[in-house]
């Protein structure tokens, strides 16, 4: 029997963050959303290296600034 292993990313989040994610993002969309975020982090880290990581961690590059998808302004 062959086991189909899939890597997973597991991080600790606060109870507040867990509640908000659960309330704001439907279960079926979470994987899709975080896959886009992970792909963008990989792409931009390859392009800009550790400068990108430092900018994100320091808050100088919020998610709105580095995602690959443009969201129309009327989506608010």
Image (tube, rainbow, N blue to C red):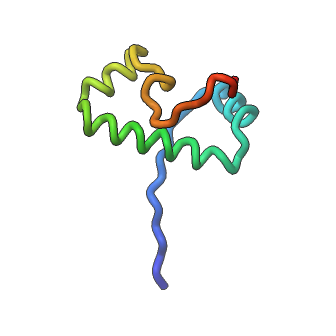
Q: Position of residue 61 (x, y in %)?
A: 41, 19
Q: Residue furthest right?
A: 23
20 relative to 10, above or below: above
Which image quarter: residue 73? top right
Q: Nearer the viewer, residue 19 or 61?
A: 61
Residue shown at the point (71%, 30%) measured from the top left: 19
Residue shown at the point (42%, 44%) measured from the top left: 39
Horizontal side, residue 39 vs residue 52: left or right = right
56 relative to 4, above or below: above
Q: Position of residue 62 (x, y in %)?
A: 46, 20
Residue shown at the point (67%, 33%) measured from the top left: 21
Q: Position of residue 58 (x, y in %)?
A: 38, 15
Q: How many tags in the picture?
A: 0
Residue shown at the point (69%, 23%) measured from the top left: 76
Horizontal side, residue 64 vs residue 41: left or right = right
Q: Position of residue 32 (x, y in %)?
A: 58, 48
Q: Nearer the viewer, residue 6 or 33?
A: 33
Horizontal side, residue 31 vs residue 56: left or right = right
Q: Residue furthest bottom?
A: 1
């Amino acid at each position: 029997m062959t086991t189909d292993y899939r890597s997973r990313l597991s991080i600790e989040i606060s109870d507040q963050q867990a509640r908000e994610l659960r309330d704001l993002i439907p279960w079926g969309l979470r994987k899709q959303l975080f896959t886009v975020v992970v792909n963008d982090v990989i792409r931009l880290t390859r392009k800009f290296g550790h400068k990108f990581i430092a900018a994100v961690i320091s808050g100088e590059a919020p998610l709105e600034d580095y995602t690959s998808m443009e969201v129309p302004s009327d989506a608010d």
